[in-house]
Image: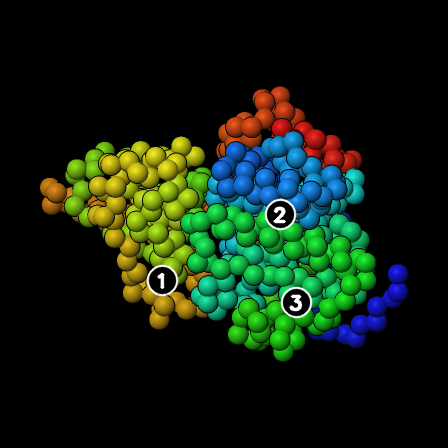
Amino acid sequence: MGEISVAPAGATETVARFVTTLAAHEIPAEALRRARIALLDCIGCAVAGARFASSAMLLDFIRDCGGAPQATVVGTGLRTSAPDAALANGMLSSALLYEDTCLIMPGHATATLLPVLLALGESRHLSGQAMLEAYIVGFEIEAALGPAIAPDHYERGWHATATVGTMGATAAACRLLGLDEERVRMALGIATSLAAGSRQNFGAMMQAFHSGVAARNGVTAALLAQRGFTADPAILEARMGFCNLYGVGTAKLDAAVAGLGRHFALLGPNLLLKLYPCGFPLQRPIDCAIELANAHDLKPEDIVEISCGVHYLIPETVFHVNPQTGLQGRTSIPYCVARAIIDRKMGLAQFTDEKVQDPAVRALMPRVKTVVPPELSREALRGKVNALAAPATMEIRLRDGRTLSTRVEYFRGAGERPLSDAEVVGKFRECAGLVLDAARVEQARAMIENLGALGDVADLAAVLAA
């Protein structure tokens, strides 16, 4: 394989150096602990996602395409090529919209990284420690590049899970393959031409597909770069490169990548886990609704109107005001608020097509109004407060003349209010137990909790195969 000659390339070079030189001893123990929690949470979501209807369609497609049996699709008996396994496991990870979110990406970080770690880890018989290190590398790249193109990227309709996620997945794949700095830069160049994903597809099967696309892009870009495939070596900062294409310039890029390896975004309140299997912007409104319903024993017939106050980008993100399916319900403020008040809980059972068509919830939904308070408006906040970090408020006007109100600054699962280890394990058991027997669930849990000691990722993949 011939040598690639590459001139210095600013931010792209900084990222590539971080990917290749971050040493295991430089990674804080707390970052490793948080990585294990994220992987446990997301693996449970992925295994459960194997039972989803849209997942079955994708798996049928992958079977028809064939492919060398290199890696496992979790929760199934299917083994396929590493890129296609990454595609499938990414979609499974996001199928239920139960997976975590990186606040400053903003998008589903682990759902784009886990599939890369499993596909290459299993096919190359890598260690659990290598898997953890690659996860942290990928997470940090996503946490750096997201702010470099925010908020314009998201406001223009790009889904950062698919775009920024592609770059993080590529970094993780390069780390696992042990690529040198020059080939990492090639891989990032390849990845930039692969990255895409529209938020208009939220509430449809394509939303979850974005995580799979990002993971497959990462594996593909790294494997091509490993073979000597070339691309622009300065893709992040180039005139027609990543930041200029997906954002509005490179003004924030150097500062965004300068802290790589010195400060770890994973240690901040940036990794957010979910208690509710629906769009991330709905976590706070659901908390508001359940709090008020429980505190005042609310019944739908008591309610005249519900006013939900949110950041200006939220109505553009979870925009289904009249959902007809469980998928659309996962991205609908009226449905989630109405359902939460009726059931006072929001789990997997609350997001079926039948639940969305329930006459009681359909009668209450029109009374749920989404508003943007002046302090959360575009004029007040643009570029200052991330939509995912903004509080939610709720006012409920009752037929007896009372008005009830509450505000949720940090929802359960936010970095400032993290779920307990027991809650994460409970969620993992709930999800993985939908597909795997109890013994396998516990075996997988133990392997993930001790991932640094795992000698071969293929052993974990075997346990996760149904």
Q: Foreground residue, 227 or 126?
A: 227
The quarter of the picture where the N terminus appears is bottom right
Q: Distance between the residues labelled 1 and 3?
A: 30 Å
Q: How far apart are marks 2 and 1 (CA)?
A: 32 Å
- Residue 329 visible within the image: yes
Mark in the foreground, 3 or 2: 2
Q: Which residue is drawn at 84% across and 68% down?
A: 4
Q: Mark 3 points at which residue?
A: 258
The amino acid type found where label 1 is placed reads Tyr
Q: Foreground residue, 4 or 56?
A: 56
**Which badge, 1 or 3, is on the more N-terminal residue?**
3
Secondary structure of the residue carrying tag 3 is helix
Q: How far apart are marks 3 and 2 (CA)?
A: 31 Å
Q: Residue at x 75, y 50 (%)?
A: 176
Identify the image quadrant of residue 290: top left
Residue 65 vertical placement versus 314 (above, below) = above
Residue 248 vertical placement versus 324 (above, below) = below
**Which badge, 3 or 2, is on the more N-terminal residue?**
2
The amino acid type found where label 3 is placed reads Ala
Q: Mark 1 points at which residue?
A: 312
